[in-house]
Image: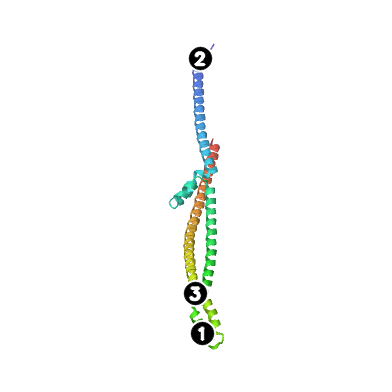
C-alpha cells in the first residue's frame, strides 16, 4: 500500500499539472485573441488600401487643387470625376483651345490679306489727281476730248463713291481684326493656364499612385514578416 506521504506528493503533482495545463490554455486563448485582433486590423487596413488604389475618386480633389482658386465653377464640375477623368477633360480642353486659336489665326491672316488688297486699291484711288492732270493733257490734244472727259467724269464719280465706301469697310475690318487679336491673346493665356493645370494634375495623380503603391508594398512586407515570425 502506498503511504500517505506518497499520496500527498502525487496529489500535489496532479494539482500542479492541472494548474499548468489551465495556465497554458489561458495563454493560448489570449494569444489567439491577440492574433485575431491583429489580423482583423491588417485586413481592415488592406481593404482601405485596396479601395484607395482602385478608386481615385478619393484623391481627385488633391489633383484639382491648382484649379480651385483660378476657376471655382470648373473645379466644382470636375471634382466629381476621377483623377483619370480630370486629366482627360483637361486634355480635351487644351486641344479645343488650340483648335480655336488656330482657327482665329487663319481668319486673322485672311482679313489681313484682304486689308492689304484694299489698301492697294485705296492707293490707286488717291492717285486720281495725278491721273486727272494727265487726262486733261490728253483731252487738250485729242479731237474727242469732250467724249473722253464725260467717260472720265463718270469713272471718277464711281471711284469717289467706292473710296467713301472703302473707308467705312476698312475701318470695320480693322476693328474686327483688333477684336480677333485680343481674343487670340486671351485664348493663348487660357491655353497656357490649362496646360499648366493639366500638368499639375498629372504630377499630383502620379505622386498619389506612387504613394499608394509604396504603401501597399510596405503593408505586404509587414504581413510577410509577421507570418514568418508567427
Which residue is more in the foreground, 129 or 153?
153
Q: Secondary structure at mark 3?
A: helix
Q: Secondary structure at mark 2?
A: helix
Which numbered disc, 2 or 3, marks the residue that appears first in the sequence? 2
**Residue at 52% in and 65% down:** 108
Q: Which residue is mark 2?
A: 7
Instruction: Return the x and y of residue 48 as percentages of the image width and height.
Output: 51, 39
Question: Residue furthest toward the bottom?
Answer: 141
> Mark 1: few, some, or many residues within 10 Å (few <14, many ≥20)?
some
Q: Which residue is mark 1?
A: 136
**Residue at 48% in and 81% down:** 129
Question: Residue furthest toward the top?
Answer: 1
Q: Is residue 155 left or right of residue 70?
A: right
Indicate the quadrant containing the C terminus: top left, top right, bottom left or bottom right.
top right
In the image, residue 13 above or below residue 60? above
Observer-side mark, 1 or 2, equals: 1
Which numbered disc, 1 or 3, marks the residue that appears first in the sequence? 1
In the image, residue 15 above or below residue 57? above
Indicate the quadrant containing the N terminus: top left, top right, bottom left or bottom right.
top right
In the image, residue 16 above or below residue 225? above
Amino acid at each position: 500500500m502506498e503511504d500517505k506521504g506518497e499520496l500527498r506528493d502525487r496529489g500535489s503533482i496532479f494539482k500542479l499539472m492541472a494548474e499548468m495545463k489551465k495556465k497554458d490554455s489561458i495563454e493560448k486563448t489570449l494569444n489567439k485573441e491577440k492574433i485575431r485582433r491583429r489580423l482583423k486590423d491588417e485586413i481592415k487596413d488592406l481593404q482601405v488600401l485596396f479601395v484607395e488604389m482602385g478608386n481615385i475618386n478619393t484623391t481627385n480633389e488633391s489633383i484639382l487643387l491648382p484649379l480651385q482658386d483660378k476657376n471655382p465653377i470648373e473645379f466644382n464640375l470636375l471634382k466629381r470625376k476621377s483623377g483619370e477623368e480630370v486629366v482627360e477633360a483637361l486634355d480635351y480642353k487644351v486641344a479645343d483651345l488650340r483648335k480655336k486659336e488656330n482657327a482665329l489665326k487663319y481668319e486673322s491672316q485672311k482679313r489681313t490679306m484682304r486689308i492689304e488688297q484694299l489698301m492697294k486699291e485705296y492707293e490707286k484711288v488717291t492717285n486720281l489727281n495725278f491721273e486727272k492732270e494727265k487726262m486733261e493733257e490728253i483731252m487738250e490734244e485729242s479731237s474727242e476730248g469732250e467724249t473722253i472727259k464725260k467717260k472720265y467724269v463718270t469713272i471718277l464719280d464711281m471711284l469717289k463713291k467706292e473710296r467713301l465706301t472703302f473707308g467705312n469697310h476698312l475701318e470695320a475690318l480693322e476693328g474686327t481684326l483688333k477684336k480677333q487679336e485680343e481674343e487670340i491673346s486671351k485664348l493663348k493665356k487660357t491655353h497656357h493656364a490649362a496646360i499648366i493645370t493639366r500638368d499639375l494634375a498629372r504630377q499630383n495623380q502620379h505622386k498619389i499612385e506612387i504613394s499608394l503603391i509604396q504603401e501597399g508594398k510596405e503593408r505586404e512586407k509587414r504581413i510577410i514578416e509577421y507570418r514568418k515570425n508567427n
